[in-house]
Amino acid sequence: MNPFTRVSYSRPSGSSWLVSPQRLDPLGTLAAWPFTAAASVVAVGYAVVATVVQWNQVVDPAAAIGAVVVVAITWALVIAGARPAGAPMLAGTGIAAVILAFCAAILETASRLGRNELLQDDFGPLLLGLLLVTLSPYRPAASIVVAAAASAVGLSLLVWPQAASLAVQVPFAEYVVVVTVPVLALGLAGAAFGEQFARSVQLWQRTATREVLAADLDERRGVARSVQQEQVTLLSRDALPFLLRVVAADEVSTADVDRARELSRALRGTLVEELDRSWLDDLGERQRSRRSRVPLVTDPAGLASTMGAEQRAAFTALVLGLCDHPDVDAVSVSIDRTTDDRSRVRVNASTALRGRGIRRLVKQYVSVIRVLFLGVRCNWAETDLTVQFDYVGS
């Protein structure tokens, strides 16, 4: 068995400054992953080149090499936190990355202390700014602003011990501007992007929610009309002739009593069946109409109806993705209650795929589910795949 486990959280709501784009649009944020990988290569490469080109200014080789190593560790941490299988990026990952990047700037300063000629060619400020831009899809805008401000203050303090040895002597404030502009410009630009993105998505979600509610109302009306039509059909076909016959008869027999009880159960059954029907049952009906593989659904308490709209969309994508895949033989879904406020979903599939094939099959779906649900687990053994996650019912 090859398990990979991650605890994730339901999508938060609130100010666009306090919500990360990844939590609002997990699928769209997957597009930022190639940029993150490319930025890591650029950052580490720039640190190496800058150190080699300015090696004549280095007074402490160990500190210079240590700075490059810390830069590499920083971006390895960012890549690990931003990878799709690790979504969503945790707050601790972002904080640790910024602290490590600032430590690299400290080591770079220490390696050239007393012989540094220019501040413009130091890699610390630029790499801190690039780091903040890279983190903007994964962390809230407010945290990016705080990190940019804190980094700017820290870099300003690093200027003080170098000021006397710099080749260009200008007022101290100009040195501060030189080292803080890259991190502030890039950091605030990343925060502005994240905040605007979050605001746009939240606006779209509010609009979509109104449409979903309106569609849900129409669906409920349709269910009511369907139930009414079935009951009218049952009444006109079976109940009304029975009642006319009983009225015309001189007495009511035991068989008539049994027949009346049978018709009553049938009428009540049509109503209960439609009321208990959920969107998950409709999903199975749509699959059947497409002549595609139909999932076996077990949801005795009707807990599927307590999922949010976005959770339903991600869950549906997973089920349909498994059902429509040619190497998947059977799919089953079960939903049970674990506590008073939490429900557990278990999706099982029988597949001929192995190892990496299974990982490729579910990676994109599980990456989104990790952001929207709790306690996501994905396990496979032999020919069986299980995806399990919890949610708090609305």
Image (cartoon, grey):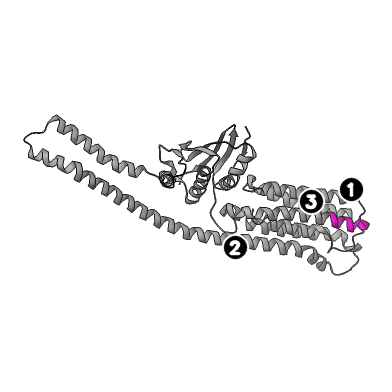
Residue 187 image-quadrant placement: bottom right
Q: Earlier in the sequence, mark 1 or mark 3?
A: 1
Residue 155: % across, % down: 79, 59
Residue 372: % across, % down: 54, 47
Amino acid type indicated by mark 2: Gln
The kind of secondary structure element at disc 3 is: helix
Q: Nearer the viewer, residue 97 or 238?
A: 238
Amino acid type indicated by mark 3: Val
Residue 372 drawn in magenta: no
Q: Residue 19: in sight, yes or no? A: no
Q: Earlier in the sequence, mark 2 or mark 3?
A: 3
Whole-angstrom CA distance, mark 1 to mark 2, is 43 Å
| Left or right relative to 338: residue 52 | right
Amino acid type indicated by mark 1: Ala
Q: Residue 282: in sight, yes or no? A: yes
| Left or right relative to 343: residue 254 | left
Q: Nearer the viewer, residue 30 or 186?
A: 30
- At x 33% / y 53%, what residue is drawn? 221
To which residue does mark 2 refer? 196
- At x 43% / y 38%, what residue is drawn? 299
| Left or right relative to 100: residue 359 | left
To which residue does mark 3 refer? 71
To which residue does mark 1 refer? 62
Name the dominant secondary structure of the magenta segment. Answer: helix
First to last magenta residue range? 48-62
- At x 19% / y 34%, what residue is drawn? 259
Whole-angstrom CA distance, mark 2 to mark 3, is 29 Å
Q: Nearer the viewer, residue 215 or 56?
A: 215
The kind of secondary structure element at disc 1 is: helix
Looking at the image, residue 201 lies above or below residue 335: below
Crowding near the residue tagged with mark 2, few <14, some 14–19, many ≥20 C-alpha atoms within 10 Å: some
